[in-house]
Image (tube, helix red, strand yellow):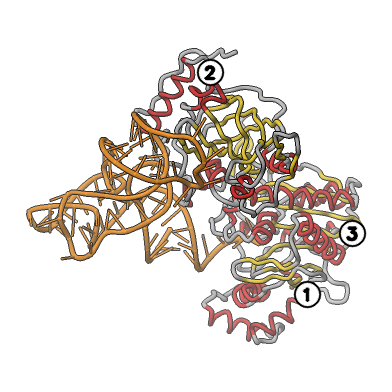
Amino acid sequence: MSMTETPAPAPESDDASLHVAARREKLRKLTALGIDPWGGRFDDHQGVGAIRHRTGEIFYQTETGEQIILPDEGTDFRAWLAAQPKGELHGPRVRAAGRIVLRRTAGKLLFIDIRDWSGQVQILVGMNQVGPEGWELAQLLDLGDLIGVDGVLRRTKTGELTIFAERLHFLTKMLEPPPDKHHGLHDVELRQRMRYLDLLYTDGAQERFLKRTKIVQSIRRTLGEQGYVEVEGPTLHTIAGGAAARPFLTHHNALDMKLFMRIALELHLKRLLVGGIERVYELGRVYRNEGISPRHNPEFTMLEVYQAYGNYETMMELTEKLIVDAIHATGDHYQVTWHDQQVDFTPPFQRRSYDELFAEHVGVDPHDHDAIRKVAAEIGFDTAGRDPDVIKSDVFEEKVEDKLHGPIFVIDYPASICPLTKRSKSNPQIAERFELYVCGMELANAYTELNDPDMQEQLFRTQLTGQKEEDSMAKMDHDFIRALRHGMPPAGGLGIGIDRLVMLLTGSASIRDVILFPLLREEKEAGNDK
RNA sequence: GAGGCUGUAGCUCAGUCGGUAGAGCAACGGACUUUUAAUCCGUAGGUCUUGGGUUCGAGCCCCAACAGCCUCACCA
């Protein structure tokens, strides 16, 4: 049985509050009773949710042996019970495990509510039903402790579904006091720093993150069904390419080599296209050394998909399917509410060209560089010596993006700001690219991929005037060019920001609500929980 | 990086005009064999984020630091 020795004294922290001291005292008493406060394997228990589904097995049996089915939920159970001939309730034997979330005594009775990830259920512990040892154990239970229970599932006089305990099993002691049993955790900082408490005590927190899992699973399923294979590229790069972002810098000791954390998945997936992996994707973390905001976290999850012999239109169809399938997988409807906004994901999504939207929202001819420059200057942008298309792009971001309620595919971008994209055959000034916007947020980005190695090399060499190298996607990668020289099939490529998709589908205002452990500043005093 | 808001008991929050700290829950002791945010009686719990300043006196006013949130910038 219990191998527990004398419990270790409270480590370092001398600031043990009354609550912690009380819990440690109970820990000591448990040990003294020969009960392991840290539990162990507990087999054959059912989820609370599954147990709640067994209510139909409860029946009332009269002394004459007549079995009566219980009334529907909502009827006055106490009155119904009083009206029955003499007898008693019978129900199935069940075994459950969970965390104590509520506790109330009524003389020689103890009501405990335990919760697991499938639901919550009440347990009734009676002094005469669990015996002296069980009762002694029951006196040592605190909110937040993990327990197991064997008992019979029945209803109390008031009709509450309840496990009438026959035996309690102590599974783990909670040494810290839990948050308010009714209000939970409101402090946003505490919820992020102590996500475990948030998951346990904030309504909807677990559901939100489990929904994230469903979305990711759905994406993998959809891609798998369409013949895409998942791969894992390197996260340590010698050149941080594939996107315009500042990388994190790190260092390999043995090779004495400067390395960057990846900012995109693109360039390695394209190497795999050259290698004959015709439909390939990676769903993984990228790292960008940029500011933090409700829509940005320094590490975030990105999906990139590449399909040989496809183009950006292929990717538009795929994007729609991925999103629609994810919505179905989470049991939602096409109409989604986000931030008081209604978004309608009914396919097909709207498609509008960049220039069209530019003209509509800026009110200026998208080809009139001088007029655009004037607008940019009015906004306050520095225009001197900068590439016209870069200026146009700045104006687009300032004037148009916020208004793209969407979902809307913005298509046909100016070629010069898209160094990894194939030009339109009919108009070399246009890149075959789309971005998907929803609620002013960029959700997806896709290209017909550039596979001409000479042109790619040239674009890497040509920094657009007015752009710093670190701000540009065009970072020379000789190995990547060499790969292209071996023949990359014409292809469509797609990137989707998974966190933002999850935000939209979970109604989350902040990206930190859908990332389990968002980046936070270090706590000042380690060991101090505040 | 700039600006704004916030920081009070373990948790959720009050705190008036600047006069030395309050509630609910949680904890501890007690009553109660059908409660359900149980109830009732009693007890304990505070470096008011930190450091300066003004003042006879600061949770409150001023300055700075730290942390979180929001807006902006960078970016997706």
| Residue holding disc 3 | A490
Name the residue at 72% across, 27% down.
A44
Helix, strand or loop for disc 1: strand
For this rendering, which residue is in front, A305 or A513? A513
Q: Can residue A482 be seen here?
A: no
For this rendering, which residue is in front, A246 or A208? A208
Q: Are marks 3 and 2 in contact (CB under 8 Å)?
A: no
| Mark 1 surroundings: few (<14), some (14-19) or many (≥20) residues within 10 A | few
Do marks 1 and 3 both belong to one polypeptide chain? yes
Which chain letter matches label 2?
A
Alpha carbons under labels 3 and 2: distance apart: 67 Å
Q: Position of residue A483 (x, y in %)?
A: 84, 48
Amino acid, disc 1: Gln
Q: Is residue A324 above or below residue A279?
A: below
| Residue holding disc 2 | A35
Q: Position of residue B8 (x, y in %)?
A: 32, 48
Name the residue at 85% across, 58% down.
A451
Helix, strand or loop for disc 3: loop
Q: Are marks 1 and 3 in contact (CB under 8 Å)?
A: no
Amino acid, disc 3: Pro
- Which mark sits nearer the N-terminus, 1 or 3? 1
Alpha carbons under labels 2 and 1: distance apart: 64 Å
* Residue B10 in the figure: left or right of residue A74: left
Amino acid, disc 2: Ile
* Residue A351 in the figure: left or right of residue A43: right
Of marks 1 and 3, the one in the foreground = 1
| Residue holding disc 1 | A350
The quarter of the picture where the N terminus of chain A appears is top right
Helix, strand or loop for disc 2: loop
Do marks 3 and 2 both belong to one polypeptide chain? yes
Name the residue at 46% across, 43% down.
A179
